[in-house]
Image: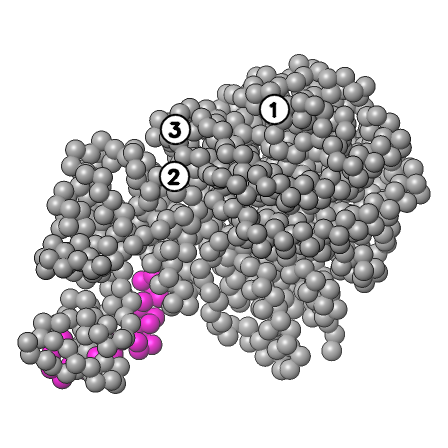
């Protein structure tokens, strides 16, 4: 059986969930032998591939780039996991929402006249459009599993990966029927 | 003018793309670094109680939350008008050292070592931490465990590895238990060995790749860092110093509240990342670098024996003031050596576990500035509160942001050296990205938000028509 | 006092005359989730988490305010009830800005505990993202309406146990909010005695001690029922 094709992505977040992923420490060595990492900020793929088995998506949808990437991921992935509180609920990334649209956050800040060094302005398409509302990823795509936490502890990430890997070794059930409705402990960040 | 885009820049923290602009003859005229993420911390933290900022600002970044935690706590200390108890100061330092070790280990092993070990032109699919595991399992394991050690320092103090809410205005919440201390001491032999292995590897690489040293961001510049009054390397609290390429001190601040007198912030319209510059020199002549290279250039000595020996060798190779951004990799490893030595010193310090760890006070000032050295450079948290304690204004100057001008200059230099015409081998583009990686940027940090960006923002619809614009 | 028997979740349970279904269930060791109910305070039946099915009634009944009767047949955990509970908690989470990760009550929060017990790992409803200002004008305490679930325990604690009636509810529907005095800042209240009972009563991180950082709030919610016992029955537990 070919190795499970694993991907990770980060949208509008802090990358803490990815750091928690790396906190699986030496188990990463074992994981490396059981999966093929096909897309991730931690590697050099620039284009999201097709036929991905599992993708962990960190971060909320905060701009157009996030949104487009998320739609692409959903289209080419069997099991999509909302990875961390920003992806599941919006969390800190969504804290700008109560202030109104993107302009309400950009404008007062940009009109703040603190610096004596004004720049002749002209935004180019290099920068993605900010969305008016930061959204958890389920607002944009169907999510198969939720892994809350800020960040989810490494042990929990490992458990879900092990379960999906073991399941795959036996019957491929979870990957074909992803909405089995696991309930993961929701208390996000008990320090 | 032809434009080649590298999108996204990978094996860094955060979101960015690079544009390489070619002139009519196919030669590189400029490379530009666009940071494409923005969340708005400086805005949405307004109206929150200032003592929440430590926990909130940790979420700026998942690699260096401790850096924000500490700078935020120090700004909070200033608002309370207190000096933290000695044990608290030392405990904070201990956690900062753990942070340095794990972050520098990540940068070297997980993010950059794939290039250094497997080669710039190696297949992209393998050129990552999993490829490192396949190519040299022992080295990968050692690097993973080095990072694990740093994380464990953080966890044993703060209760968790990422976003510990442990350092607060006034001090810290929990002491170090004797068992935790013993656990950390047991790690030391291994991590000392690991960083020596990494250093040997790095030095060999430098010997074999003089071209990289020459063209990966090699230019004179100013350097900014904290340093101890006696000239020793500093990672948390000290004099804020700017030196030039000859090593001459141009500025020396003992009070962080004066930072704005030497640091200005300039806006580029095509990046959410501002460009701080040394104010007396204006923009862009005031380009300066922060981080490991700067800290090593600014200090006279590291202050610990093994690290001092390494620093001496570093200076024999690079000169008293190292100018090549490629040497950030070497500098980073020397800082790990120093950090391990200082961790040991602190663990053996009886004052670490004596006395109060948290000072109590009410609000005594309404402006507080906290500085600390993050792994990537000097970090400033500036808070202004109302009389109840709600934040009215937040300004954050982030380590990586201060390297923005230098990063742009670095990738231009690399692109101009390696790229001719628009058919560019993937390995060449990787070298351009590697110029960014040398700085170990933290882009989630650097674009926490805004503050004083003067900008023209245009909102485009799907067809590319401008539907709205906002001018500064 | 008369004793009666009823059936809860197929189990025979005995209760005293006058007990509510909730009291009877708790005596028998059965858990029915609650939020607006707190021992020592009057009952309002507001949150609807304790809704149960009672045979013979077409409507669901709130266990905290419904008296147990002889021969009553009650079910507390049918699929329908569990689903409704989930919806209630998810609606509460969507209504205001509940950021567990950076909250003073993280790990000590009844709303969070309810969500955990119900196995909620995401909220199906659209987050409202309302805008509420934090009030930390009081010397000892703070009020963050972003975390409030309008259980009104603070209102009842202040009115019934302390007697000051500093807290009350203003507005209607989704614009309801708890206020101090006539919506003056808490620090300027002329009625507040700074006793802190409201802070003890609050199930979430909406009311807190000044200076509390993430997950630092510690409460003893049994304090209030102990005060009532002391006052009414002259019994002090040592």
Please report the bounds of the magenta region as a residue range: C68-89
The residue drawn where x is 83% and y is 59% is B136
C116 sits to left or right of B402? left
Q: What element carries label 1?
A: strand
The structure residue drawn at horizontal position 23% and vertical position 72%, both measured from the top left corner, is C26
One can see residue B133 in this view: yes
Residue drawn at (39%, 28%) of the image: B363
Q: Is residue C61 magenta?
A: no
Q: Which mark is residue B200?
A: none
Q: In this view, does B138 lie to the left or right of A190?
A: right
- Judged from this view, the residue extending furthest toward the left is C1
Q: To which residue does mark 3 refer?
A: B363
What label sits on residue C211 in the rendered view?
Answer: 2
Counting labels gives: 3
Task: Please determine whether, in this image, residue C199 is positioned above or below residue C9.
Answer: above
In 3D space, how far apart are the residues under numbered discs 3 and 1 (Cα atoms)? 29 Å
In this rendering, does residue B35 appear at all?
no
Circle nearer the viewer, 1 or 2:
2
* Residues at marks 1 and 2 on the same chain: no
Q: Where is residue C132 in the image (x, y as percent from the top left)?
A: 33, 41
Quadrant position of residue C77: bottom left
> Vertically, is B290 above or below A177?
above
Cα–Cα gap, marks 2 and 3:
10 Å
- Which secondary structure, mark 2? loop
Dot 3 lies on which element? Answer: loop
Q: Which mark is residue B265?
A: 1
**In the picture shown, does residue C196 fall above or below C75?**
above
Task: Tell me if label 1 and label 2 are in contact, CB under 8 Å.
Answer: no
């Amino acid at each position: 059986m070919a190795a499970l094709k694993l991907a990770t992505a980060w949208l509008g977040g802090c990358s803490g969930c990815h750091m928690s992923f790396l906190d699986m420490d030496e188990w990463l060595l074992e994981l490396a032998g059981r999966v093929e990492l096909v897309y991730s900020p931690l590697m050099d793929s620039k284009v999201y591939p097709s036929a991905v088995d599992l993708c962990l998506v960190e971060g909320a949808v905060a701009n157009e780039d996030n949104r487009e990437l998320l739609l692409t991921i959903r289209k080419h992935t069997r099991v999509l996991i909302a990875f961390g509180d920003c992806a599941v609920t919006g969390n800190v990334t969504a804290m700008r929402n109560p202030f109104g649209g993107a302009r309400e956050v950009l404008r007062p800040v940009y009109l703040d006249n603190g610096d004596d060094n004004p720049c002749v302005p002209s935004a180019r398409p290099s920068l993605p459009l900010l969305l008016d509302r930061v959204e958890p990823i389920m607002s944009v795509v169907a999510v198969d599993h939720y892994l809350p936490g800020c960040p989810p502890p490494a042990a929990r990430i490992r458990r879900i990966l092990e379960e999906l890997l073991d399941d795959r070794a036996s019957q491929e059930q979870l990957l074909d029927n992803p909405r089995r409705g696991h309930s993961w402990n929701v208390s996000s960040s008990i320090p | 003018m032809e434009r080649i885009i590298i999108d996204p820049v990978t094996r860094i923290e955060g979101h960015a793309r690079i544009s390489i602009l070619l002139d009519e003859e196919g030669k590189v005229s400029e490379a530009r670094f666009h940071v494409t993420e923005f969340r708005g911390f400086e805005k949405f933290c307004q109206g929150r109680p200032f003592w929440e900022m430590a926990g909130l600002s940790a979420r700026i970044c998942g690699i260096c939350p401790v850096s924000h935690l500490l700078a935020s706590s120090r700004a909070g200390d200033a608002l309370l008008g207190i000096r933290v108890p000695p044990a608290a100061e030392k405990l904070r330092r201990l956690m900062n050292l753990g942070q340095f070790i794990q972050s520098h280990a990540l940068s070297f092993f997980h993010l950059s070592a794939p290039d250094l070990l497997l080669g710039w032109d190696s297949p992209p699919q393998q050129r990552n931490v999993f490829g490192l595991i396949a190519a040299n399992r022992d080295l990968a394991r050692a690097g993973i465990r080095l990072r694990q050690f740093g994380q464990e320092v953080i966890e044993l103090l703060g209760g968790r590895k990422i976003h510990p809410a442990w350092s607060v205005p006034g001090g810290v919440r929990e002491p170090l238990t004797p068992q935790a201390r013993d656990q950390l001491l047991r790690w030391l032999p291994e991590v000392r060995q690991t960083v020596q292995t990494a250093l040997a590897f790095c030095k060999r690489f430098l010997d074999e790749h003089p071209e990289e040293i020459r063209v990966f961001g090699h230019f004179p510049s100013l350097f900014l860092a904290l340093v101890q009054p006696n000239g020793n390397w500093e990672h948390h609290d000290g004099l804020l110093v700017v030196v030039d390429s000859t090593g001459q001190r141009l500025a020396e601040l003992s009070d962080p509240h004066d930072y704005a007198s030497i640091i200005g912030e300039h806006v580029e319209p095509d990046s959410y990342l501002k460009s701080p510059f040394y104010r007396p020199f204006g923009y862009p002549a005031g380009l300066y670098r922060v981080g490991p290279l700067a800290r090593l250039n600014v200090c006279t000595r590291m202050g610990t024996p093994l690290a001092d020996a390494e620093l001496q060798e570093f200076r024999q190779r690079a000169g008293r003031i190292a100018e090549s951004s490629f040497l950030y990799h070497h500098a980073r490893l020397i800082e790990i050596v120093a950090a391990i030595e200082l961790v040991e010193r602190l663990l053996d310090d009886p004052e670490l576990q004596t006395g109060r760890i948290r000072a109590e006070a009410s609000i005594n000032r309404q402006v507080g500035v906290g500085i600390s050295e993050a792994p990537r450079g000097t970090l400033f948290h500036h808070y202004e509160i109302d009389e109840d304690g709600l934040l009215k204004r937040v300004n954050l100057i982030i380590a990586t942001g201060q390297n923005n001008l230098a990063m742009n200059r670095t990738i231009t230099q690399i692109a101009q050296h390696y790229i001719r015409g628009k058919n560019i081998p993937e390995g060449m583009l990787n070298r351009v990205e590697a110029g960014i990686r040398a700085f170990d940027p933290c882009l989630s940090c650097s674009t926490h938000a805004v503050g004083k960006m003067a900008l023209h923002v245009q909102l485009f619809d799907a067809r590319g028509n401008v539907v709205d614009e906002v001018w500064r | 006092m008369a004793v009666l028997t009823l059936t809860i979740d197929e189990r025979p349970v005995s209760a005293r005359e006058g007990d509510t279904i909730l009291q009877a269930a708790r005596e028998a060791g059965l858990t029915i989730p609650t939020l607006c109910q707190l021992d020592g305070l009057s009952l309002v039946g507001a949150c609807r988490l304790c809704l149960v099915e009672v045979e013979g009634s077409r409507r669901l009944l709130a266990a905290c305010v419904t008296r147990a009767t002889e021969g009553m047949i009650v079910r507390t955990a049918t699929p329908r009830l569990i689903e409704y509970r989930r919806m209630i908690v998810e609606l509460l989470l969507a209504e205001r800005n509940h950021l567990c990760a950076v909250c003073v009550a993280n790990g000590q929060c009844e709303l969070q505990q309810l969500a955990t017990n119900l196995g909620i790992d995401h909220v199906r409803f659209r987050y409202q993202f309302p805008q509420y200002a934090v009030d930390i004008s009081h010397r000892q305490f703070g009020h963050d309406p972003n975390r409030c679930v309008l259980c009104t325990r603070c209102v009842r604690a202040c009115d019934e146990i302390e007697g000051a009636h500093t807290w009350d509810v203003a507005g209607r529907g989704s614009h309801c909010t708890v206020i101090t005095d006539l919506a003056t800042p808490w620090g300027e209240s002329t009625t507040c005695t700074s006793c802190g009972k409201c802070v003890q009563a609050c199930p979430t991180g909406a009311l807190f001690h000044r200076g509390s950082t993430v997950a630092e709030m510690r409460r003893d919610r049994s304090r209030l029922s102990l005060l009532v016992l002391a006052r009414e029955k002259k019994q002090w537990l040592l």
